[in-house]
Amino acid sequence: MDSHCDAPRVLVIGLDSATWLVMQPLVEAGRLPNLARLMAEGAHGPLRSCVPYVSAPAWVSFATGCNPGRHGVYDFVRRRADGYDIELVSAANVRVPTLWQILSAAERHVGVLNVPMTYPPCPVRGALVAGMLTPDLHSDFTYPRELRKRLLAAVPGYRLEPTILGAVPRPEMKARLQQEVVESAEQRAAAARFLMEEVDGWDFFIVVFTELDRLQTYLWDDMDPHHPLHDPASAARFGNAIPAHYEQLDRLLGELLTKVDPRTTTVMVMSDHGLGGVHQFFFPNRWLAEQGYLHYRRNMSASIAWGRRLLKQVGLGGVAKRAAAHLFPGWAAPSQLRSAAFVHDVDWTRTLVFWAADNGFWLNVKGRDPQGVLAPGVACDALCRELTEKLLALRDPLYGEPVVDEVWRREELYDGPFVHESPDLRVIWHEVPQERRTHFAASELWGEQPFGTTALSGDHMRDGILVAWGRGVQPGITVTGASLIDLAPTILYLLNQPVPLSMDGRVLRAMLDPDLVAAQPEQREQVEAPIQSSGGFAPGDEETVVQRLRDLGYLS
Ligand SMILES: [Zn+2]
């Protein structure tokens, strides 16, 4: 072997929304043999996500080793600086360099496949295939650009996401989704094998499987006889779909493991957050309206009906729609339209607080928000305390249990130059892990009741999974206290690279081989690497939405 073959390498296999709540029993039943082997021979434990535990900020936190206050991504959407409306975010909104940009700057070779929030693709030393939020397969979603053709030739059925048919009856939708998930994961693994060959001698390689998130979100009720949407006929057909997909992923993991040598390569299997059943979704704006904090311009049921009608009528073209269709499957219209209609229908001159599509409570502050009513300072503080008390006291009508476990002001939760781009208040939902269940806010902005069901039967939980194996990992270790932001520093350390001073995460030394830790001191230093400062969606796509709404008389 020449010296390059002995160089340390890291392979990351991301399983979006993988949870120990499902995996642990499957491992114990002998159904995930490859994962069980990695766990027995390596380290494993829970992996704490960021807040909110939504894929976009979670994957960016993973990729940058920073908290959202520093990297600037809080959701797939963000509030426009000058209004109440939202816009889609892209890789151009990530304000610090990613692991692959840092490694590329250090002349290491990287392969990056299907990581959410990597569109538009950034230049790397190696290859990058953008993931979730890529508009479609005709977009330039690879770096280098010509890679797209070679990828689609090598993996002809390659797809970005399984299609979710929101409008068809549930059994048909589930059957189609299950089939697409299975196919999509096979294609993703084929693409990973292709890309591993393309980036000859890669030092770092990551592939993310996002199919599990879609499957668990829509088919969780088939695994849980107590779920309000549970239907025994459906369960007889789809009850094993989620476990079977974990088995498929385990088989694909086994195939990828044949490509690596554990003496030189560290393998990490991880998820960006967990997932559990949601028996009742919480509709924050309806609750705020009932509490007198939010006012609509007409009575609430008329507003809801109007909003629904509007969304049925309005069509939308362009890249933003195609991207949003991946993100908000099952909705009649993309999030921007729902948000625009909501913004139009709220009486901002009387509204103190609202819940936006970026998963948090915003105060409507004088001098800061376009039609702000709340005086900054003491009045905001008092309202935050009042809301916190009410949210913590809130009980789920189905079980009489808490809905919210923690409420945080953004300054308490985040650190960095972009804290002000977060909603003012964030909540941590109450989780019931022994019943594999959690609470979550519905993405619906109106809501007919404060609590209710939606087309989804599951949603995210705060802890994901981490399994590490191979070079530098101490065997038989249970990892505690690991956080998503710790992986980037740990990966850099394993690749013998300095960890940027600006990274919030820490090297997970407790799971590493003590000999390695003793021999290799951790270097923290200023690291220069480019970020993506331009690109994103074409401006015309956003304008199309606004103009369409104006044409229809919904915006003045
Ligand atoms: Zn996710």
Image (cartoon, grey):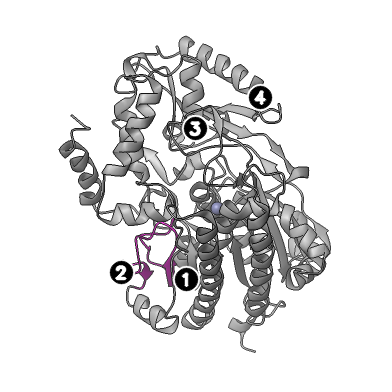
Residue 483 within the magenta-colored segment of the rendering: no
According to the picture, the residue beneath numbered tag 2 turns out to be 138
Front disc: 2 or 4? 4
Tag 1: amino acid: Glu
Residue bearing mark 4: 395
Q: Considering only order in the chain, which callout, 2 or 1, is on the residue closer to the N terminus?
A: 1
Label 1 neighbour load within 10 Å: few <14, some 14-19, many 20+: few
Q: SS for tag 1?
A: loop
Q: Residue at x 45, y 16 (%)?
A: 293
Q: Which residue is mark 3?
A: 360
Which three-letter amino acid code belongs to the residue tagged 3?
A: Gly
* Furthest residue in direction bottom, as rendered: 1
Name the image quarter holding the N terminus: bottom right
The Cα–Cα distance between marks 4 and 3, rounded to whole angstroms, is 19 Å
Cβ(mark 2) to ligand 1 < 8 Å? no
Q: Earlier in the sequence, mark 1 or mark 4?
A: 1
The percent position of residue 256, horizontal first and vertical second, equals 62, 77
Mark closer to the observer (1, 2): 2
Q: Which of marks 3 and 1 precedes in the sequence?
A: 1
Residue 482 locus on image (x, y percent) = 70, 49
